[in-house]
Amino acid sequence: MNARAPLRVAMIGYGFMGAAHSVGWRQAPRMFSLPRDIEMAVVVGRSPAAVADAAAQWGWAEHATDWRSVIARDDIDIVDIVTPGDSHAEIAIAALEAGKHVLCEKPLANTVAEAEEMLAAAERAAARGIVSMVGFTYRRVPAVTHLRDLIAAGEIGAVQQVRAAYRQDWLVDPQAPLAWRLQKEHAGSGALGDIGAHIIDMAQFVTGQTVDAVAGVVETIVARRPLQDGGSGLSATAGDGYGDVTVDDLAIFTGRLAGGALVSFEATRFATGRKNALTIEVSGDRGSLLFDLEDLNSLQFYDRTAPVDRQGFTKILVTDPSHPYVSAWWPSGHMLGYEHGFSHQVVDFVNSVADGSRPHSSFAEGLAVQRVLAAVEASAERDSAWVRVGAMAT
Ligand code: SOE
């Protein structure tokens, strides 16, 4: 590979995450100083008409319907996978074996076995300088990395308890259609894998500790839904006939961190009124830190060591350009939003491709989350008994 030539990207998939990733590929090189230029070369999808529209809307130079032939092309350097989970393993392994750098949406796979095969392929490819990353995008929100750094610096002391919740409500309507996210063969699991994966990853990322054991329940509230006849993802539309929902609508579980602290996790699509509400609060023996996605430019910090007449949760704005992710955007105090994490993901990925370093979140971290997801399902099947995450190896 010519070290100065532009990196040519092929994105496989074009739903909601395709739009978000396209924004990242388009904005990152315009706002950040990257070591390599980026070309949005080709977007791939099954429907010729829909993928042509996606290419035109988001600025991909070409569109195609056969991902295998795109991966085989010599002029593609990066494969970005934004398809449903049932095709992640096949596409990622083929791309890595073809010598492409791979960015794969979360959760890494639908099963632990698939994620293990993907990690093995990523490790083989890494020996040839090929980079892989899982798209746990919320890691790239400036306030989340600041939260991690404050914990690592000892600002809240020893972590004693964590509360993590990801709440949405797009399934409260019983007529919401049976989209792929509600079918186990496509999605692997429901709220658990889709949004629970984010808070599992975030809890591990900010504390620097693994979730070693879990006990929990998963529940499906609406068991049958109208079949989908149009749209896609969260914008799917209902048609005639009904089918079975084969994934969970919500998951509530407790995790034990390696250091001993307990984490309460809640992942739900039935939190009426909560559209995309992710919160994580970490309590330590010196203080507490809270991140709230609905207020994503800030953290709440409580310092137990402050004089008692000045104690209380303080809002820390994380909008100063001294933060590496904020540096390329706006002057201090000018807010970022949901989409900026996708640009930061591109920045970190491209820097790693250029300098040969291994970016987080690695496929190994993706597999770690996959094992926690599997352990929660195993616990739910065993009347919420504690299940060790390590036991989820195949
Ligand atoms: C749907 O629940 C979803 O799009 C997730 O799949 C994404 O990972 C999250 O960023 C927003 O919600």
Image (cartoon, helix red, strand yellow):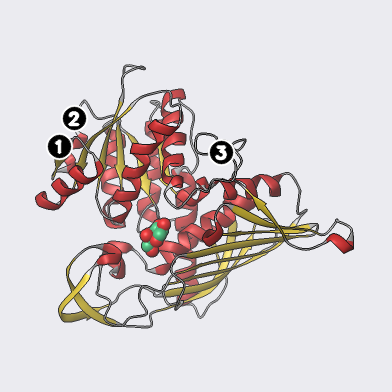
Quarter of the picture holding the N terminus:
top left
Alpha carbon of mark 2 to alpha carbon of mark 3: how far?
42 Å
Residue most toward the left? 48
- Left or right? Give the position of 176 relative to 242: right
Instruction: State which image quarter holds ligand 1.
Output: bottom left
Residue 331: mark in rendering = 3
How crowded pointer 1 is (Cα within 10 Å; few <14, some 14-19, many 20+) is rated as few
* Count of numbered tags: 3
Residue 204, above or below 194: above
Query: What's under tag 2, amino acid-wise?
Result: Arg
Residue 36, above or below 242: above
Residue 232 percent coordinates (x, y): 23, 62
Alpha carbon of mark 3 to alpha carbon of mark 1: how far?
44 Å
Residue 296: mark in rendering = none
**CB of mark 2 near ligand 1 (< 8 Å):** no
Write down the residue under mark 2.
73
Residue 131 percent coordinates (x, y): 40, 33
Query: What's under tag 1, amino acid-wise?
Result: Ser
Write down the residue under mark 1.
69
| Front position among marks 2 and 3 | 3
Residue 390 percent coordinates (x, y): 53, 57
Residue 149 percent coordinates (x, y): 66, 44
At x 19%, y 43%, the residue is: 55
How crowded pointer 2 is (Cα within 10 Å; few <14, some 14-19, many 20+) is rated as few
> Is there CB contact under 8 Å for labels 1 and 2?
yes
Judged from the image, the secondary structure of the residue bearing numbered disc 1 is helix
Judged from the image, the secondary structure of the residue bearing numbered disc 3 is loop
Quarter of the picture holding the C terminus:
bottom left
Q: Is residue 131 visible?
A: no
